[in-house]
Image (spheres, rainbow, N blue to C red):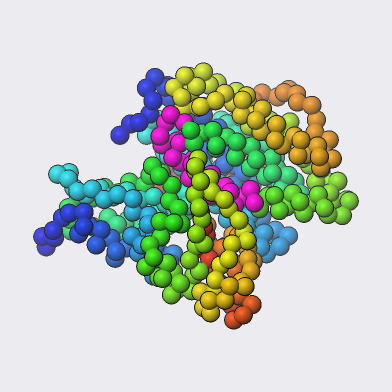
Amino acid sequence: MSSLPAGISHDALADLLLALADDELVLGYWDSEWTGIAPLLEEDVAMSSMAQDEIGHALAYYSLLAPHSGIDPDAYAFGRTPPEYRFARLLGHARTDWGFTIARRYLYETADAVRLESLSRSAWPELAGLTAKMRREEAYHLLHLETWFTTFMSAAPSAAERFRANLAQLWPDALDLFAPLPGEDELLRCGILPEPMSTLGARWEATVRPRLEAASVAVPLNSATLPPRSGGQHPDFSWLWNEMTMVYRLELGAVW
Amino acid sequence: MSAVVNEASVRAALRDVVDPEIPTISIIDLGIVRAVTVDAAGVQVEIIPTFIGCPAIGVICDDVRARLAEFGPVEVRVCYDEPWTSERITPYGRECLKAAGFAPPAHVRVVEGGTFPLTLHQVVPCPFCDARNTRLENPFGPTLCRAIYYCPTCRQPFEHFKAV
């Protein structure tokens, strides 16, 4: 059963699917750290539930790639060295405090919504179907974030200022979610990617930048100085990688 | 045992397979069996998950294989050819959920393009006393598919099977 559009190379397919999967996997792992220590009991449950969604989405993306690469989804998730991961710089940072976590999620989820809407129109039916399903689940994440965005912005000045500073700090790294992919020309030609990443990035920025500026966030001018999708090289990630791959590395090839 | 192998008999057998997290509802009534085909190669079943990250999917697929073993070779495929939505739960399935203390999902109108108008202000009647003045405590619950509500009339917390 192969409905994969003809003419796509494995490398180009991996460029897209590993970027998507690694973003979701690493965000899921960072945010799962709130289980047990979130500021409210309800947030413990909410953050754990959303982290489980993200890790499930990562598994689904790795599983789409697996039949074409012959590589097991677990080997993608846990069998690579930190620099081999393809997630965006936004996801390299440690979870830090609650405001930082919410600021990152706000930027990530609004960007992911733009990405998923586009991918649900992919010429590859499996990817279109999967991302259409994800959009329904992510609707709950977006509602959660809208609530927290409003809560922080109307909080005591010290909390609101810190939240604004987090958003401004993370903005350049969030743009990395829309960095051009190495195999993008091929992906576009086959219709797997319906639109260039730069188009998606501009669409996201056109909705989110005015929203942030209206909330008095000092959104920086865009500047790309670091290599694209180099989140795996962030110093914070080596700690998380060690944690999340520990069991996998303990006994390679173990069957559970 | 020589069971009659056709789509109807396979679907009837699948009524015995339940959601391991809510064992009062069958996977047929939950609406996650998208297609059953029977041909010379055997039986093929397509499952569409309620939530992509649902950890029960592996168990459900194993249970389907075990229940259908008497019908010959069985292939179970998890797919997203169409999204599972809470509108796929049958009327009987909604009764099963309610009998187990779960409020059935509020009805959602699916609009063109795969999105749906999600609101947290939907009326979710209490599964115990049918009061309509319940309130949402948390849109996220103990599993991906559940939200937590409270009924001030009978003073019961309860779970709502999420509309999606």
Please, is residue A252 above or below residue A205 in the view?
Answer: below
Q: Is residue B82 magenta?
A: no
Q: Is residue A95 left or right of residue A243?
A: right
Number of numbered discs:
0
Q: Quadrant of the N terminus of chain A?
A: top left
User: Residue B122 in the image: x percent, y percent?
Assistant: 59, 62
List the single residue furthest toward the right. Answer: A157
Please, is residue B122 above or below residue A54 in the view?
Answer: below
| Residue at 84 percent of width and 49 percent of height | A160
User: Residue A202 in the image: x percent, y percent?
Assistant: 66, 27
Residue A11 seen in render:
no
Q: Which region shows up in magenta?
A: A122-143
Q: Is residue B68 left or right of residue A191?
A: left
Please, is residue A204 above or below residue B4 in the view?
Answer: above
User: Residue B162 in the image: x percent, y percent?
Assistant: 52, 60
Q: Nearer the viewer, residue A22 or A235?
A: A22
Which quadrant of the view contains residue A205? top right
Residue B122 seen in render:
yes
List the single residue furthest toward the left. Answer: B2
| Residue at 48 percent of width and 74 percent of height | B101
Q: Is residue A133 magenta?
A: yes
| Residue at 46 percent of width and 57 percent of height | B86
User: Residue B30 in the image: x percent, y percent?
Assistant: 39, 60
Please, is residue B87 above or below residue A95 in the view?
Answer: below
Q: Main secondary structure of the magenta part?
A: helix
Q: Is residue B111 left or right of residue A72?
A: right
| Residue at 53 percent of width and 79 percent of height | B129
